[in-house]
Amino acid sequence: MRLSTQIKPISYLKANAADVLHDLAHGGAPMVITQNGEARAVIQDIAAFEKTQETLALLKMLALGAHDIEAGRTEPARDVAARLKAKLSART
């Protein structure tokens, strides 16, 4: 995806808002909106935004996990499984 082909001035968005939203909803690429010749905003379809947010959340979890590994804050899976089984047994 090349954002350079999707750069429009804010006046374009004002004049064509319904068309822009229609294009975005039907798989259109995100659009960079400029004001006074400078990039000011990016608009995208809500589904694409949500997917991006989910991806960022997963990447953050992976980064946190990597930091835990580097810091030595890990346990063997079998030990965790045994502890969870013991807790479940104590509840019943």
Image (cartoon, rainbow, N blue to C red):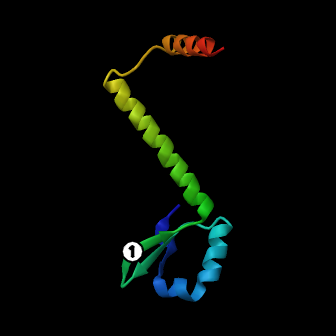
Taking the image as shown, residue 68 lies to the left or right of residue 27, namely left
**Which residue is label 1 attached to?**
39
Residue 2 at x, y percent in the picture: 50, 64
Residue 55 at x, y percent in the picture: 52, 47
The relative height of residue 42 versus residue 80 in the rendered view (above or below) is below
Amino acid at dot 1 = Ala
Q: Secondary structure at mark 1?
A: strand
Q: Identify the residue at horizontal 60%, vertical 63% (top origin).
A: 46
The relative height of residue 31 versus residue 52 in the rendered view (above or below) is below
Tell me which corner region of the image, top left, top right, bottom left or bottom right, holds residue 71.
top left
Q: How many marks?
A: 1
Mark 1 neighbour density, 10 Å: few (under 14) some (14–19) many (20 or more) = some
Looking at the rendered image, the quarter that the C terminus falls into is top right
Residue 68 at x, y percent in the picture: 36, 28
The relative height of residue 1 versus residue 79 in the rendered view (above or below) is below
Residue 34 at x, y percent in the picture: 42, 79
Q: Identify the residue at horizontal 64%, vertical 80% (top origin).
A: 19
As rendered, which of 38 and 91 lies closer to the eye?
91
As rendered, which of 69 and 7 lies closer to the eye?
69
